[in-house]
Amino acid sequence: MVPCFLALGGDRRIAYRYRQGSGPTLLFLPGYASDMLGSKAEALDALAEQHGLPLLRFDYSGTGESAGRFADGTLDAWLDEAQEVAKLAAGPLLLVGSSMGGWLALHLAERLQARVIGLVGIAAAPDFTSWGYSEAEKSQLAAQGELRRPNPYGGEAGLTTLRFWQSGERMTLLDRTINYAGPVRLLHGDEDAEVPLDIGVRTKDRLASADVQLTVVKGGNHRLSAPHELTLLKETVLALLARSPSAT
């Protein structure tokens, strides 16, 4: 499936792929510096194809196949892009967010409220600008405007800009109630070196919803992309869809 593009003004052309189907639309939000062609997105696409479900996935500006510079990205801009992409689908949504995408999915659920029939967070990382950087790294960001840290998965060093970090600090969630009342399923590995399991616990406790489950995956790392972990993701999505009155 080749990408389509959504023009949002300026140089922002957001690449997306939309698999048509019936029932609530799965909207996948990738992680930081990730894209819509990763293993979890592809697993969801295979699930959607198998069950005739609509799936909408996209790349934030400056990542993947979308236009723009990654260094210009901010959390609030990417959230606005997610909300614009969501308008491409009709009817209810089931949000699936990976890492930073989980942070954005929680914000998007607050914005869209009843349209969101459920949310799945995969190693969700709300507020990682607060807890994910040392004081020395924050000082370097303030002084130099950017920070590069080794990529734990190899390849080019990961970039954080001061503008992105500041946008994250404006959008923290774990210091307040997360105002979404629908069902939430949080999947988190107990060997996640990037997002401590405690973040999953804190997210669970901050959600206004009474229907929140945190599933701890033994031996799971941050990616949660082993075959049995992808199976868990797909089973979790199907279980939430089965509960929706609009599901087919």
Image (cartoon, helix red, strand yellow):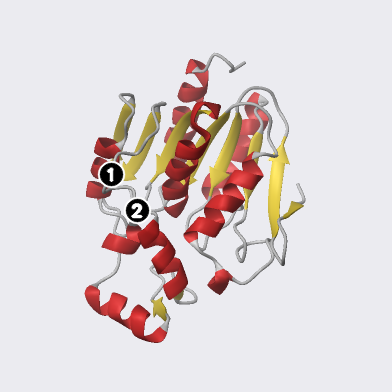
Measured as percent of width and height from the top left, residue 19 is found at 71, 37
Measured as percent of width and height from the top left, residue 195 is found at 31, 55
| Dot 2: element | loop
| Dot 1: element | loop
- The residue sitting at 31% across, 35% down in the picture is 207
Q: Quick one: label 2, few (<14), some, or many (20+) residues within 10 Å?
A: some
Measured as percent of width and height from the top left, residue 183 is found at 40, 26
Distance (Cα) linking label 2 and label 1? 8 Å
Please name the amino acid that badge 1 sits on: Arg
Apparent side of residue 47 relative to residue 164 in the rendered image (left or right)? right
**In this figure, which residue is indicated by the disc labeled 2?**
172
Task: Point out which mark residue 87 bears.
Answer: none
Please name the amino acid that badge 2 sits on: Thr
| Residue 227 can be seen in this image | no
Q: Quadrant of the C terminus?
A: top right
**In this figure, which residue is indicated by the disc labeled 1?**
176
- The residue sitting at 38% across, 32% down in the picture is 185
**Which quadrant holds residue 51?**
top right
Badges 2 and 1: C-beta atoms under 8 Å apart? yes
